[in-house]
């Protein structure tokens, strides 16, 4: 179950990106219904990119061969919004529980 958390992205842009969820699911070889998007309204303070930075954190079952493709997909969409895009992958493997059930 890939969980995407977006920081520095306006809700309307995230909803536009969500329209490409089927492409993203194909890249990751997962069911569209298993992909979750969170919109985190936090902002970056410091390092000179305060008004032009996006962070995307992806928590998922490890797919190392898919990481670069996923980053390119994100970059292709969000590069028109920001020139500073951080993408972080976190492997949750057997550490994700939803309603008490292990999803890893």
Image: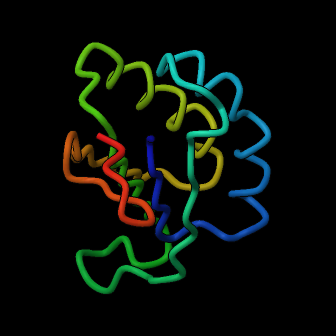
Quarter in which the C terminus is drawn: top left
- Residue 22 appears in which quarter of the rendering? top right
Q: Residue at x 26, y 83 (%)?
A: 46
x and y, in percent, of residue 61 in the image: 29, 34
| Residue 90 or residue 94, whichever sits in front | 94
Q: Residue at x 49, y 62 (%)?
A: 6
Q: Is residue 41 depicted above or below 4 in this figure?
A: below
| Residue 4 or residue 50, whichever sits in front | 4
Q: Residue at x 54, y 81 (%)?
A: 41
Q: Is residue 87 left or right of residue 76?
A: left
Q: Is residue 42 left or right of residue 81?
A: left
x and y, in percent, of residue 68 in the image: 34, 22
Q: Residue at x 32, y 86 (%)?
A: 45
Q: Is residue 75 left or right of residue 59?
A: right
x and y, in percent, of residue 88 in the image: 27, 48
| Residue 57 or residue 59, whichever sits in front | 59
Q: Is residue 22 depicted above or below 88 in this figure?
A: above
């Amino acid at each position: 179950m890939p969980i995407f958390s977006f920081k520095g992205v306006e809700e309307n842009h995230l909803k536009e990106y969500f329209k490409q969820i089927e492409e993203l699911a194909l890249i990751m070889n997962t069911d569209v219904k298993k992909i979750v998007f969170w919109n985190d309204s936090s902002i970056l303070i410091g390092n000179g990119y305060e008004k032009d930075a996006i962070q995307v954190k992806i928590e998922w079952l490890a797919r190392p061969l898919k990481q670069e493709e996923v980053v390119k997909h994100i970059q292709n969409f969000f590069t028109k919004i920001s020139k500073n895009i951080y993408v972080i992958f976190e492997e949750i493997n057997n550490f994700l529980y939803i309603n008490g059930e292990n999803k890893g």
